[in-house]
Image (spheres, rainbow, N blue to C red):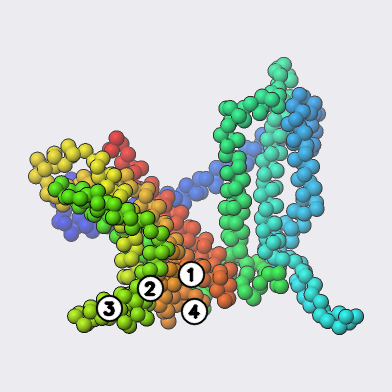
Amino acid sequence: MNLDYYRLTPWQRFIYKISQFFKNIGKGIVGFFARIFHAIAGFFIGIGRGFKEFGQNFWYGDALTKSSHFIMGLSHLFRGQIVRGIIYLLLETAFVLYMVFFGGNYLAMCFENFFGGGNIGRVETYDFWNEDEGVYDKIVGDNSFLILLYGILTLFVIIFFIICYVVATRESYELEQCRIIGKKPQNFKKDVNNLLDNKFHITLLSLPMVGLFVFTIVPLVTMILIAFTNYDASHEVPQHLFQWVGFDNFKELFYGSSNLGATFWRVLGWTLLWAVLATFTSYIFGMLLAMLINRKGIKLKKLYRTLFVATIAVPQFVSLLIMSKMLDTGGGVLGSGGGIITQIVEQIFGYHLKFGIDINTTRICIVLVNMWIGVPYSMLMCSGILMNIPNDLYESARIDGASPVRRFFKITLPYMLFVTGPYLITQFIGNINNFNVIYLLSGGGPGDLMLYTDGAKGTDLLITWLYKLSLGIDRNYKLASVIGILVFIISAVFSLIVYNKSSAVKGEDNFQ
């Protein structure tokens, strides 16, 4: 830090720190997108190198190697790796059969109108009059959602096959080189031994990777693509087909003629404000509580910690439902309209608790209840960290005349932030998606006339609004998918930028 900084007034130092904060945020955003650009560039460069290697292997390979580019595993069968060759041959056969009889048709129906804005599917379900029986019969057409799902699955199958195909052709050329130098190829028994020894991590991770692909990647990609369709209650499957609409849903959310865009920005603002308040109130008060309990001279420390641990033992949704009933305006203990405690407060202070009626009051109550739930976790975590801070640092600071406040900001807080930096980022992202506290306490209410009428209320977060859009009367899946994408982008960008700027990464050498 420049020596001129210490000549500034406290107010000028504050302005300087604020400017540096936003400057670092800007650098972080630029660096984030620069990394994305470099990653994309590296991806295409890798593809180019792969094509170059593929062409060289085909051009310089012998007839058997060239034939293996059309019939996978042929070179393996004739050069000593019979089992691996059979596996490659069966894989190619299964891929061709899958594409001919199943995947190819779904892939065509899914993306044939992708750029033209047409239907996903070809035949829509309809009723026709059966003159012989005198009734209406239903002709079941295509299911747009299944077509989209199977089309995405087929894309991943094609990508997997291409990877296996590139590996097989590369191995074919390597087998040819081994034959030229007289080296014996590795047999199947040795491959199995490697998978159980040197490459055992591949064996262990194969099943989790399959689960990650089936239960995370495929649904995530499906959700992303739904954002580019008009899938809603009026296009409910399988009765109706839905269409590709490009970026129309994003335009509607940001620049729509209705108050949908204003609703999004208001909900986004409250979501970010809630995440900041929920994260740092629980963290700061938990830290202060831990410091208070750990002070010398405080008796019954174990009892205090046990009491807070007992509050954690109660399931969170039970605590939230109980607090919701206590704050109920229809007669809860803490709510207006009959609560004993509320009546006393109203008579003494003349204050009426308007939980569920006034938006700001409801938001304050939600933050306070979240503190009551979250402070014990932070207190226990901080207690363990405080015990590991060397006492020599505090003794040196006392000798130098540092006040308790200065010792906190110069020793305790930096050490805590260094250890708990990743935890804070995780908590912040978790609070952005904190469905339970909002939905179980207030249900997103009270209503706000300034918000879009499709489900959003005064205390709704983006995640609760997304839930209402998906399961509400109108079932606006397209808008819910757009919001889901935006939540992901916000969470990812914030996590990467703040983590790379945190002391846990930049100041690691200072705490060794």
Q: CA distance from mark 1 to mark 3?
A: 34 Å
Where does label 3 land, which residue? 340
Q: Residue furthest top?
A: 182
Between the residue at mark 4 and the residue at mark 1, the CA separation in whole angstroms equals 11 Å
Instruction: Kindly identify the residue that appears in the image at 34 percent across and 63 percent down.
Output: 370
Locate residue 201: give its quadrant.
top right
Residue 406 in view here: no
| C-alpha gap between disc 3 and disc 2 | 14 Å
Task: Say what secondary structure mark 2 lies in.
Answer: helix
Disc 3 to disc 4: CB gap under 8 Å: no
Of the two numbered discs 4 and 1 on the same chain, state the one appearing first in sequence: 4
Identify residue for label 2: 325
- Tag count in the figure? 4
CA neighbours of label 2 inside 10 A, class few (<14), some (14 to 19), many (20+): some
Within 10 Å of disc 1 (Cα), the crowding (few <14, some 14-19, many 20+) is: many
Distance Cα–Cα, label 2 vs label 4: 26 Å
Q: Position of residue 176 (x, y in %)?
A: 73, 24
Q: Vertical placement of 441 versus 65: above or below?
A: below
